[in-house]
Amino acid sequence: MLTKRIALAVLLGGLVAAGTATASDKATADAAIAAAKTAQKAAAAVGGEWRDTGKIIKKAEQAATDGNYGNAVKLAKQAEEQGRLGKAQALGQVGVGNPKYLYN
């Protein structure tokens, strides 16, 4: 019986600790969202912003507002990666054009 109570106490303690958000969690989420916005702007500057990047950033901001900082960071990193990939894609396509046979 004592073992069950100890196990229950450890489980509840872990759940409370896992559910407690700290100021550093919020700061981490805010920094990740800021980095995602920077990457989005860099991609947009070269015409390579992907369709869903802004939507993902909005979801990250909403998750941070709701206190779900882990999900906010995950979404912000996804949006940041899309920004970097979109910029690289746009820069890689500069001057490529279409094949000549399309114009005959």
Image (tube, helix red, strand yellow):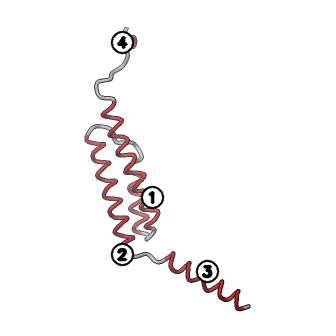
Q: In this rendered view, identify the residue nearer to me: 58 or 82.
A: 82
**Residue at the spot of label 3:** 11
Q: Name which residue lies at 33% across and 29% down.
A: 93
Is 102 above or below relative to 4?
Answer: above
Mark seen at residue 91: none
Q: Disc 1 to disc 2, how far (Cα)? A: 17 Å
Residue 49: image quadrant is top left
Which badge, 2 or 3, comes first in the chain's sequence?
Answer: 3
**Given this view, does label 3 or label 4 mark the residue nearer the observer?**
3
Q: Which label is found at residue 100?
A: 4
Question: What residue type is disc 4 on?
Answer: Lys
Whichever of callouts 4 and 1 sits on the residue coming sooner in the sequence is 1
Asked if the residue under mark 3 is in contact with the one under mark 2, i.e. CB atoms within 8 Å, the reply is no
Neighbour class for label 2 at 10 Å: few (<14), some, many (≥20)? few
> Which amino acid does the dot numbered 1 rest on?
Lys
Q: CA distance from mark 4 to mark 1?
A: 43 Å
User: If you read the primary sequence from the N terminus, does the residue marked by circle 3 or circle 4 appear first?
Assistant: 3
Whether the residues at callouts 1 and 2 have beta carbons within 8 Å, the answer is no
- Give the amino acid type for the residue marked by disc 3 in the picture: Leu
Mark number displayed over residue 74: 1
Per the rendering, the mark at residue 23 is: 2
Helix, strand or loop under label 4: helix
User: Residue 31: x percent and y percent?
Assistant: 32, 62
Nearest to the eye among marks 1 and 3: give it: 3
Q: Quadrant of the N terminus?
A: bottom right
